[in-house]
């Protein structure tokens, strides 16, 4: 079912940066290339994630130009979902 009303803008923002700076394929330095924004609904409220994305720019590397996303993103939400893992794992209470 389609959403009829737009969601409210998140009041909080959290910036996530990858911990790893060296490419797992060739060991060379990966630069911060671009940034993605992603809204996330958690039990404590709505938050906007700003994800800093790194990429390996070395020709011949197996991971050449593949995105390396922040590791902490996977601990907060599933890929392509707008609800946090705390909401997904919430067990409904039966009356």
Image: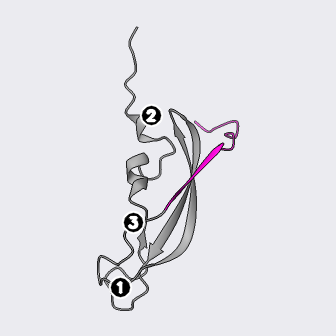
Residue displayed at 33% across by 86% down:
61
Q: CA distance from mark 3 to mark 2?
A: 26 Å
Magenta stretch containing residue 10, yes or no?
A: yes
Colour scheme of this structure image?
one colour
The residue beneath circle 3 is 19
Which segment is the magenta one?
Answer: 1-16
Residue displayed at 43% across by 47% down:
76
What is the x, y in percent for residue 83? 49, 41
The residue beneath circle 1 is 28
Helix, strand or loop for disc 2: helix
| Front position among marks 3 and 2 | 3
Tell me which label, 3 or 1, sits earlier in the chain. Answer: 3
Q: Nearer the viewer, residue 68 or 16?
A: 16
Which quarter shows the N terminus? Answer: top right
Residue displayed at 43% across by 62% down:
70
What is the x, y in percent for residue 78? 41, 48
Tell me which label, 3 or 2, sits earlier in the chain. Answer: 3
What is the x, y in percent for residue 65? 43, 80
């Amino acid at each position: 079912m389609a959403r009829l009303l737009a969601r409210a803008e998140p009041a909080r923002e959290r910036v996530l940066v990858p911990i790893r700076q060296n490419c797992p394929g060739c060991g060379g330095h990966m630069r911060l290339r671009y940034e993605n924004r992603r809204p996330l609904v958690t039990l404590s409220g709505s938050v906007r994630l700003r994800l800093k994305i790194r990429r390996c720019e070395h020709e011949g590397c197996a991971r050449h130009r593949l995105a390396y996303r922040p590791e902490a993103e996977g601990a907060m939400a599933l890929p392509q979902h707008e609800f946090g893992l705390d909401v997904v794992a919430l067990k409904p209470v039966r009356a």
